[in-house]
Image: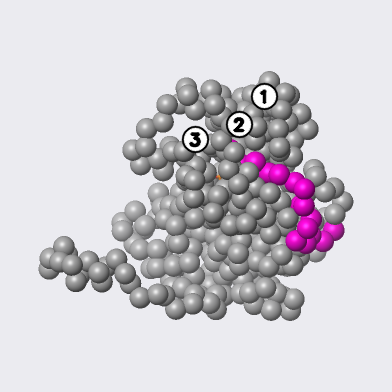
Amino acid sequence: MNLATPAIRRQVTTPPAPASPFPYNPGSLLSVLDLSVAAVSRLLQRATALEHEDPIVRDRILAKRRIALLFYESSTRTRTSFELASKALGADTTLVSNLSSSIEKGESLKDTGLTLRALGAEAIILRHNSSGAAWLLEQSTRLPVVNAGDGMHEHPTQALLDLRTILTHLRPGIGEVGPETLAGVTVTIVGDILHSRVARSNMLLLPRLGARVLLCGPKELLPEQAARSGPGIEIERNFEAALAQSQSVMMLRIQAERLAGLQLDLDEYKAAYQLTGQLLAAHAPSAVVLHPGPIIRGMEITAGVADGIQSAILEQVTNGLAIRMAVMERALVPSEQEGGRA
Ligand code: CP
């Protein structure tokens, strides 16, 4: 077959519009857009309630429920916190990694998911290097699928834990959140926006709570069209000017594994976009510093800032545990309020 013929090329490049992907399994979380603002508020409140719950009571919430962690990419924070969160609710967990499973022999994502379901998995937490993989797994298995990061697409639980961290610092003691909760707050995201699923999930979540999201980075890592990703998103390429407007600064790692041949002068990058103690003191002395991790000390952030008093990086990690407990409860315990896709 000659794939280069115009007729075939048309077939390949313009597939029919897909039917609506809904209904998802109501426990799935593929994107922050799966959550209404009210649902985000409920998750945040459940995270706090579960964090303070008696461990013996908490242990019964998902007692003996089976959760599979399916990881095609390396992870420290997300994998460990999902596993600990699931176990804190009493669930049994099993980890399947691409490096030590039949994925290495060529088994597809669909067949791996169906195999896990046949073994009794009731929910799957997926990290994958391809954007859209979580959606494919959901469609193949119809189990609750929780997206733990899919390619350059989304990392919804990271955005939720980032939100919890921002609220702790900028809106302490707040109960419910709504569309105006972060009005007047500018969160600046700095660095490799192009390849960052964390940036994308935050860009889709924070403006719905009233925040302004300012993106900062060089053209290679931050294309102009990023400002058109949604309302409340702007670009400021000058790092000092961006810092001066920020109540929170989220630094990102350059994702070397996704650069695909893109050449960056790292010395130039550091000179323009590295967060140093001097810059922070001069332009954003009270901003909360975030980083999803892993941090590369001496590249996007200095060790002094990472370990400094404005850094909330380890708080983010801790918040991941509470948020992921709430997300796994949502995945497996039907809620009347959720009513499916709230
Ligand atoms: N933030 C984050 O996704 O970190 P890990 O890759 O270590 O899970």
In this figure, which residue is indicated by the disc labeled 3? Answer: 218
Q: Position of residue 11 (x, y in %)?
A: 26, 71
Q: Amino acid at mark 3?
A: Pro
Which colour assignment does the render follow? Answer: one colour
User: Which of the image's four quarters has the N terminus?
Assistant: bottom left
Q: Tell which circle, 3 or 2, labels the residue nearer the N-terminal end.
A: 3
The reply to whether dot 3 and dot 2 touch (C-beta < 8 Å) is: no
From the viewer's perspective, tell me whether residue 193 is left or right of residue 277: left
Q: Mark 2 vs ligand 1: CB under 8 Å?
A: no
Region of the chain picked out in magenta, as a range: 175-190
As drawn, the residue found furthest toward the right would be: 173
Which residue occupies the foreground of this view, 44 or 166?
A: 166
Q: Quadrant of ligand 1?
A: top right
- From this viewpoint, is residue 37 visible? yes
- From this viewpoint, is residue 84 visible? no
Q: Tell which circle, 1 or 2, labels the residue nearer the N-terminal end.
A: 2
Q: Is residue 186 part of the magenta span, yes or no? A: yes
Of the residues tagged 1 and 2, which is closer to the observer?
Answer: 2
